[in-house]
């Protein structure tokens, strides 16, 4: 299945205590692209003042837009989780954009990276659940106002849909990215010689590339907003949702 | 039936979910348009939800595509 298994090239082999810690182009991309983003943001936020410079203004605008979106889901109590969600979104967005650059390793089309992110979010959700509710965490899986006979079945069902979350998060992101690559590959493989079909395929793949930038932004947003919804789910539970409405 | 032919049929069957996805995306955007047409001031609140729903629905289509590829190239 070499469609989904891109070969990573080992740049600097390191073996430590029996672990393979070699630096491949995969690892280099995952670290490098966020470092560039960190540099840009650090420059923008270096001199904070009440009369913001252009960089600070832009950064504040972007951050506040997403801050408000996340706050709408999380409520006042969940303010502390917003920076994590924002940085998660930026990370995924930049790696998605990196996918589109030729000769850059397509990180987010690897299930290894996306599943790691999904499991990270999952561990965070479980942690928040136990932190906020303690042992009452298990009550989240039993909706209110159902007959006692149904409770075990619903518990199993809810638990399953809870456990499947990291996998669905990871698969959605990876498959979206792979689908974009496959589409470009298929359109590109129509090109043959110098003909009208070649010209059409170049035009279509240009349009598709622009479309892919939109998909990159959309999938990063979806990943972050779904993590946000899961966190809000675990924080508020079933009872408080009812009260708010 | 030869394996290759069976594969092609399997891949064709695997993208049947696109029927439902097409209906769903049409439903999402028709509802979005009619709700904005009734109350244009709500656009800012409704659009992110619609985009989220669109992305979630699109993922189903891509899962089907993945299965089709797995059948074809595995």
Image (cartoon, coloured by chain):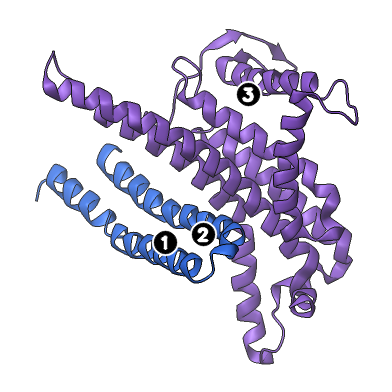
| Quarter holding residue A154 | bottom right
Q: Which mark is residue B50?
A: 2
- In-image side of A158 versus A180 (left or right): right
- In-image side of A93 versus B69 (left or right): right
The residue closer to the viewer here, B23 or A169, is B23
Where A27 sits versus A140, above or below? above
Where A7 sits versus A51, above or below? above
User: Which element carries disc 2, helix, strand or loop?
Assistant: helix
Query: Marks 3 and 2: same chain?
Result: no
Q: Which mark is residue A1?
A: none
The residue closer to the viewer here, A122 or A189, is A189
> Can the viewer see residue B59?
yes
- What x and y, as percent, mark residue A39? 74, 18
| Quarter holding residue B39 | bottom right
Mark 3 surroundings within 10 Å by alpha-carbon count, few (fewer than 14), some (14 through 19), many (20 or more): many
Mark 2 surroundings within 10 Å by alpha-carbon count, few (fewer than 14), some (14 through 19), many (20 or more): some
For the point 67% across and 89% down, which residue is it? A146
User: Which element carries disc 3, helix, strand or loop?
Assistant: helix
Residue named by callout 1: B29
- Chain coloured purple: A
Q: Which chain hosts label 1?
A: B
Where A66 sits versus A38, above or below? below
Q: Which chain hosts label 3?
A: A
- What x and y, as percent, mark residue A32? 65, 17
Query: Marks 2 and 1: same chain?
Result: yes
Q: Mark 2 touching mark 1, by CB under 8 A?
A: yes
Q: Which mark is residue A30?
A: 3
Q: CA distance from mark 3 to mark 1?
A: 36 Å
The residue closer to the viewer here, A141 or B26, is B26
For the point 44% across and 24% down, which residue is it? A6
Q: Colour of chain B?
A: blue
């Amino acid at each position: 299945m070499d469609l989904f298994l891109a070969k990573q090239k080992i740049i600097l082999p390191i073996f430590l205590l029996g672990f393979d810690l070699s630096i491949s182009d995969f690892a280099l991309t995952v670290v490098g692209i966020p470092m560039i983003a960190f540099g840009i943001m650090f420059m923008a936020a270096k001199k904070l003042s009440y009369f913001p410079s252009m960089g600070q203004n832009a950064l504040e605008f972007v951050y506040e837009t997403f801050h408000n979106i996340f706050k709408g889901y999380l409520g006042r109590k969940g303010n502390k989780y917003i920076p994590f969600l924002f940085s998660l979104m930026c990370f995924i967005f930049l790696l998605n954009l990196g996918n589109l650059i030729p000769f850059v390793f397509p990180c987010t089309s690897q299930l290894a990276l996306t599943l790691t992110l999904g499991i990270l979010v999952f561990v965070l959700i479980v942690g928040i659940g136990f932190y906020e509710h303690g042992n009452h965490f298990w009550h989240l899986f039993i909706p209110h106002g159902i007959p006692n006979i149904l409770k075990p079945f619903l518990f199993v069902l809810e638990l399953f849909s809870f456990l499947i979350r990291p996998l669905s998060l990871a698969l959605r992101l990876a498959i979206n990215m792979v689908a974009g690559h496959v589409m470009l590959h298929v359109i590109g493989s129509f090109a043959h010689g110098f003909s009208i079909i070649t010209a059409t395929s170049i035009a279509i793949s240009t349009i598709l590339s622009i479309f892919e930038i939109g998909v990159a932004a959309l999938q990063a947003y979806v990943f972050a907003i779904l993590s946000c919804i899961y966190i809000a789910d675990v924080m508020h539970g079933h009872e408080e949702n009812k009260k708010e409405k | 039936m030869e394996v290759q032919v069976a594969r092609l049929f399997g891949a064709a069957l695997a993208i049947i979910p696109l029927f439902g996805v097409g209906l769903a995306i049409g439903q999402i955007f028709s509802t979005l348009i009619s709700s904005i047409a009734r109350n244009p001031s709500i656009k800012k609140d409704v659009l992110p939800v619609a985009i989220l729903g669109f992305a979630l629905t699109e993922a189903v289509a891509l899962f089907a595509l993945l299965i089709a590829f797995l059948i074809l190239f595995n």
